[in-house]
Image: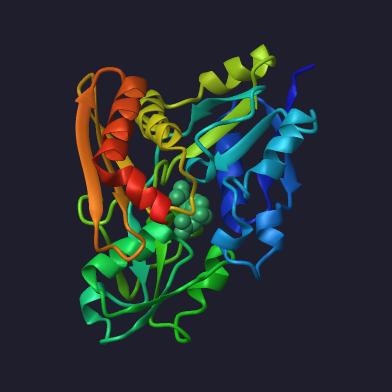
Amino acid sequence: MTKIVRIATRHSELALYQAREVASRLKCDFEIVEITSSGDRDLISSLSQIGGTGIFVKEVQNALLEGRADIAVHSAKDLPGVLPEATTIAGYLPRGDIRDAIFGSRISDLREGAIVATGSARRRALLLSKRPDVKVVDLRGNIRSRLSKVGEVDAILVANAALVRLGIDLELGEIFEPEEFCPQIGQGAIAIEARLDDLSTLQLVREVSDSDTFLQLTAERSLLATLGAGCTLAVGAYSSLIGPRVSLFGMISSSDGDEFVTVKMESEDPGLLGQRAGAFLLENGGSRLLSNG
Ligand SMILES: NCc1[nH]cc(CCC(=O)O)c1CC(=O)O
């Protein structure tokens, strides 16, 4: 009898798409276990009010920890720097688009004092650094409900990977290159988490894991773990591969985007690279920016 792999995922359209992507690559039978997370249920509090890191992933991880699932599929971006002791990221799918997009209007076409919605401290800071005149308002909810707010607001900021995965055209708007609008750590990557004691599942996932994405995400997540930062802070990073070397750009911003600390480093050891880049950011003003919020 072949094993049936139970895949835990959030129940949003994007999360289900990502879980099916994983399922289609695994060489085995599968079953999707949908979890409604507290982050999805509570649409009233802002992300920073709910606080804590990993609100979207905790309940999906619990299904894995309690043996109700064999793997958990997450947007890598939503995973906190530190995982539960009993689990690990067994692999990643080949990374999708890492870039952010503005939906509803190009930045330069926004009227003076336009209202732009995002729940992300990083996107808020980066937008304000380019357009200090705009008013940024908080926004939660799934991708389609967020996009439907254009009209009430002038534009919203969103991960382009989400638009691509849901097949949504960016009719009015633009996509930002990472050099001008630093993505979130892990953006565009789909992570597959498994229990450390489940060797057969770890092996199954390793067979479909993308090694380039693994190197990039190791560097980016090592930076995240070094900062000890969660999704509520204006932090971003992205990496690229140059032959056997990993290049990592990282940034910490003040909440209004008027002050930035940045770093760019290269190494053949992605874990060490993330630690060094993180330590550099903290020592060069990042600690102060993080504690000021
Ligand atoms: N924070 C929610 C979230 N988590 C992952 C994605 C998009 C997919 C990805 O970045 O891989 C999104 C939506 C967004 O940031 O607009």
The residue at the point 31 percent across, 31 percent down is 279
Left or right: where does residue 72 sit relative to residue 158?
Answer: right
Give the residue displayed 20% in from the left and 27% down from the top. Answer: 266
Which is more toward the observer, 283 or 244? 283
State how many labels appear.
0
21 left or right of 236 in image: right
Is 37 placed above or below 20 here? Answer: below
The residue depicted at 35 percent of the width and 29 percent of the height is 219
Image-based side of 237 in relation to 75, left or right: left
Q: Position of residue 159 (x, y in %)?
A: 41, 57
Q: Is residue 31 visible?
A: no
Quadrant placement of the N terminus = top right
Does residue 95 lie above or below 212 as drawn? below
Foreground: 39 or 150? 39
Task: Tell me if residue 112 comes above or below residue 82 in the rendering.
Answer: below
Classify residue 181 by image quadrant: bottom left
Q: Position of residue 103 (x, y in %)?
A: 37, 71
Q: Is residue 56 visible?
A: yes
Residue 182 vertical position relative to residue 116 in the rendered view, above or below: above
- Which quarter shows the C terminus? bottom left
Tell me, what colour scheme is on the image?
Answer: rainbow
Residue 180, given in percent of the width and then of the height, sits at 21, 56
Residue 127, position as x, y percentages in the image:
30, 67
